[in-house]
Image: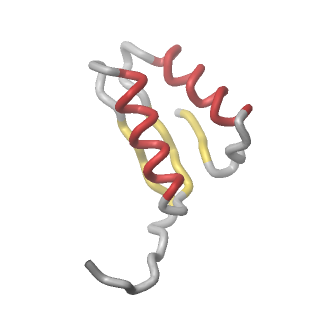
Amino acid sequence: FSNDPHKPLGVVACISPWNFPLSIFTGQVAGALAAGNAVIAKPAEETPLIASLAVALMHEAGVPRAALQLL
């Protein structure tokens, strides 16, 4: 492990699979946001409603809209 300062990657694409749509989706998005990245999230074709509700809850909780976008 290194003690060097962490540098965010910038904009990260999070593409979630159809199985476990909420847990995998939120895990990917939360990890990328925690590392200081902006996120473009694309859910599986079968689960757009779950992803939309999750993003709405994250925005309501204080995640800036510019930092988290849903495709």
Left or right of 67 in this view: 17: left
Residue 46, given in percent of the width and then of the height, sits at 37, 13
Left or right of 67 in this view: 24: left
- The residue under the point 71% across, 47% down is 64
Residue 33, given in percent of the width and then of the height, sits at 53, 52
Q: Judge by depth and name the residue closer to the eye, 15 or 63.
A: 63
Residue 6, given in percent of the width and then of the height, sits at 45, 76
Q: How is the image coloured?
A: secondary structure
- The residue under the point 38% across, 18% down is 45
In which quadrant of the rendered view does residue 54 lie? top right
Quadrant in which the N terminus is drawn: bottom left
Counting every numbered tag in the picture gives 0
In which quadrant of the rendered view does residue 43 lie? top left
In which quadrant of the rendered view does residue 21 lie? top left
Left or right of 68 in this view: 13: left
Residue 30, given in percent of the width and then of the height, sits at 49, 45
- The residue under the point 41% across, 32% down is 25
- The residue under the point 71% across, 36% down is 61
Residue 36 vertical position relative to residue 56 in the rendered view, above or below: below
